[in-house]
Image (cartoon, rainbow, N blue to C red):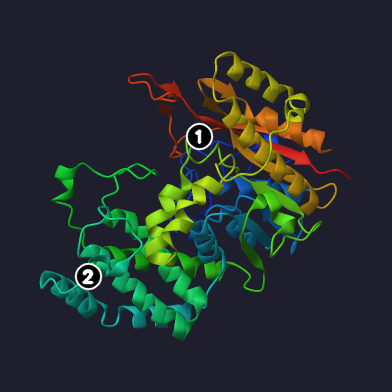
Amino acid sequence: MVKDTRQMTLDAPSGEISTLEDVNWTFEGADTSYFTHGLHPYPARMIPQIPDSLLNYFKSEGIVSQGDTVYDPFGGSGTSAVEARLHGLDAETNDINPLACMVTRAKSLPLDTRRLKEARDSLLNGLTDDLRETRHEYEKEQLELGQNSAVRDGWFPEPQLSELLCIRQRINRIRDEYGVDIARLFRVTLSAITRKVSYQRNGEYKRYRMPEEKRANHDPDVLELFQSELRSSIELMREYSNRVDHSLTTTVHYSDSRTATDNENPVAENSADVVITSPPYGDHRTTVAYGQFSQDPAIIAGDYGYDEMKNVDKNGLGGSNSDLKPMEELEEWSPSFGATMDTLREKDGRADDAMRFVRDYFEVMKEVGKILKPGQPAAWVVANRTMSRVNIPLHLVTRELCEELGYEHHATLPREIPTKTLPWENAPENVAEQKGELMADENIVVMWSPE
């Protein structure tokens, strides 16, 4: 039996959650990388203790039971999907980021570990020689840099970029022999080291290069990085695969949650027993740039195109590709949003951006209302943010707009964010030396869908 390394910080004894308020939702010091949660970094990731605690409560109250379905319209890197399977539940998710979908599938789908190790041995057999030959060809100037990769110039040292692409070619051969699922785990492993190899500046999710003087001495060992990451990936998958039921179903839609029930491969109406999700904190351009974070890893490890990845942030909530028209009614249905918009207009702030984001967010709420079965819970993990130095109380906006759709409010659970990688300060108006506080707290807004 694999040791369950999940850590819960409860005022009541572990496992005895009589109310959601029994939980200390901050989870400071908890291990957030147990099982496959530790497979791949991702911006603003919801920590697994949140869905773990919610599902423990919902199961203890008989609200969900073995074989029910958890839906997450903002699947991200798969936190809800992994926790669903750990709790004996099916899962279904949406995300518009192909890297997020790839990582979610890799994290949540258990593998035959014997066959996985065979594939690993095949992948590594001769890899050292291949990488040595790649470097040799580069030094003889016979290798076309990047092998016509879609990666933009100036973001990677050579021959390391070609070495990364060499590993991808080997993973493609593994796919043909051992299947898509095993190859996917290797792709996610390759993706996890891509930013370390690049000139990406440490500690940044957006695309910022390290200073030019540091690039000259940046000479990462691709083979060492990959082998180390691969050992970790296989061990995490071994523990996870030994722990979960392989017969459960996890469905990941690479599609827009604003049209979840009307996509080419739709989520069925009245199919989910519980929704647990962490929506984006704001439009990707100014808050958390999921697409910028994912661009090079997706192109190199997943073989996605540059244009496809360039559009991820534009396609996000409130992004420039949204074709939804503003709704003045939102300001009436949510007095908190109305007051925010009034303040933004008074100071000539970014009212249009706020409207686009909340308009898109409301569309997802409507879709969730179709997918969630009557009388079942939806938990929205949201953080308040500032826009043009105006606080947007997203927990109140979420509650008020859900109530307009007929939901019943069950609880709003505050939590501090002790270690989450988010911007704590920024310069919203790009004025030098002017900074404003950003997201240091979250709220979990639990609503019950209409009967």
Q: Regarding mark 1 in the picture, which secondary structure is present there? A: loop
Q: State whether residue 405 is above or below residue 257.
A: above
Q: Residue at x 61, y 62 (%)?
A: 252
Percent x, y of residue 239: 49, 66
Give the quarter of the image for residue 320: top right
Residue under label 2, please give it: 144
Residue 422 visible in the shown view: yes
Percent x, y of residue 221: 21, 62
Q: Farthest residue to the top: give it.
A: 346
Q: State whether residue 227 is above or below residue 156.
A: below
Q: Is residue 104 left or right of residue 334?
A: left
Residue under label 1, please give it: 417
Q: Which badge, 2 or 1, comes first in the chain's sequence?
A: 2
Q: Residue at x 44, y 25 (%)?
A: 428
Closer-to-camera residue (39/18): 39
Closer-to-camera residue (149/105): 149
Q: Residue at x 51, y 22 (%)?
A: 388
Which amino acid type is shown beneath numbered disc 1? Answer: Ile
Which amino acid type is shown beneath numbered disc 2? Answer: Glu
Residue 62 visible in the shown view: no
Which of discs 2 and 1 lies nearer the camera? The answer is 2
Estimate the spatial distance between the alpha carbons at disc 2 and disc 1, rounded to whole Å: 46 Å
Sort mark 2 into few (<14), some (14-19) or many (20+) by Cα contacts within 10 Å.
few
Q: Regarding mark 2 in the picture, which secondary structure is present there? A: loop
Quarter holding the C terminus is top right
Percent x, y of residue 72: 65, 52
Q: Residue at x 38, y 19 (%)?
A: 434
The disc label shown at residue 159, or none: none
Q: Is residue 439 left or right of residue 171?
A: right
Q: Is mark 2 in CB contact (under 8 Å) with mark 1?
A: no
Closer-to-camera residue (135/183): 135
